[in-house]
Image (cartoon, rainbow, N blue to C red):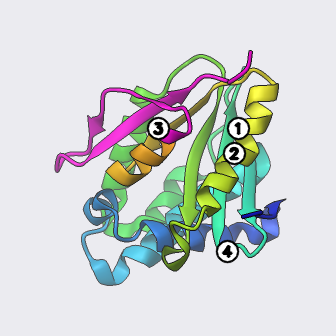
Amino acid sequence: MSVDIDRLGPDDTALVAGRIAEAFTELDVTRWLVPDASKREAVLAGNFEILVGHAMRHGLVYASGDRAAVAVWFPSVGEPAPPPPDYDARLAAACGEWTDRFQHLDELFAANHPHPDHHHLAFLAVQPERQGQGLGTALLEHHHAWLDANGMPGYLEASSPNSRDLYARHGYQVGEPFRVPDGTPFWPMWREPVGR
């Protein structure tokens, strides 16, 4: 299956954030982040909008042509990008009573993030009814081609056994998991460029 891939711009920030929230609403870790199922997707979308907006300025945001799948990459090369403007206040506004859980997750990610130059896949999300159709694979292969051509490693944190196994099939090596307070794991994964 051939999948058209487009690079998106700032006007698509809310669409991308909503797509990620929709795809991630039923993950174990998002149940911990926002225990109230009736508010989870909206809170996640607000949080992701901050991060996707930041990626529009400092990263790379791609989508399938039909926008059913999105990928958000941050180059982690040289000097780190500044944090999103007014991050603490915006996080509190988006996440409300669960802000401390999102802050805890940010700290976990920072503590486990590798230091060598790489591109960080922050999000890969596919509409639930479109999962398993190769859209996520197409987005991965699209940016992996650039990474391989430029000798750049990739890094991500897999949030479920299914995503961990998908990434492993694409050359990512699984590291020792780290966990949020209820025990739910994230698997840090690293991919060396192919063909160099």
Of marks 3 and 2, which one's residue comes earlier in the chain?
Answer: 2
| Residue receiving disc 1 | 144
* Mark 4 vs 2: CB contact within 8 A: no
Given the image, on which type of amino acid does mark 4 rest?
Leu
Measure the alpha-carbon separation of dots 4 and 1: 24 Å
Above or below residue 124? Residue 175 is above
Given the image, on which type of amino acid does mark 1 rest?
His
| Residue receiving disc 4 | 15
Q: Residues within 10 Å of mark 4 (few under 14, many from 20)?
A: some
| Residue receiving disc 3 | 168
Q: Which residues are magenta?
A: 169-196
| Residue receiving disc 2 | 141
Q: Residues within 10 Å of mark 3 (few under 14, many from 20)?
A: some
- 118 left or right, relative to 127: right
Judged from this view, the residue extending furthest toward the bottom is 38
Residue at position x 46%, y 37% from top?
A: 168
Q: Position of residue 156 (x, y in %)?
A: 51, 38
Q: Which mark is residue 120?
A: none
- Residue in the foreground of this view, choosing between 45 and 165: 165
Residue at position x 60%, y 57% from top?
A: 136
Callout 3 secondary element: helix
Measure the alpha-carbon separation of dots 4 and 2: 22 Å
Q: Quadrant of residue 3?
A: bottom right
- 128 left or right, relative to 59: left
Given the image, on which type of amino acid does mark 2 rest?
Glu
Dot in front, 4 or 2: 2
Dot in front, 4 or 3: 3
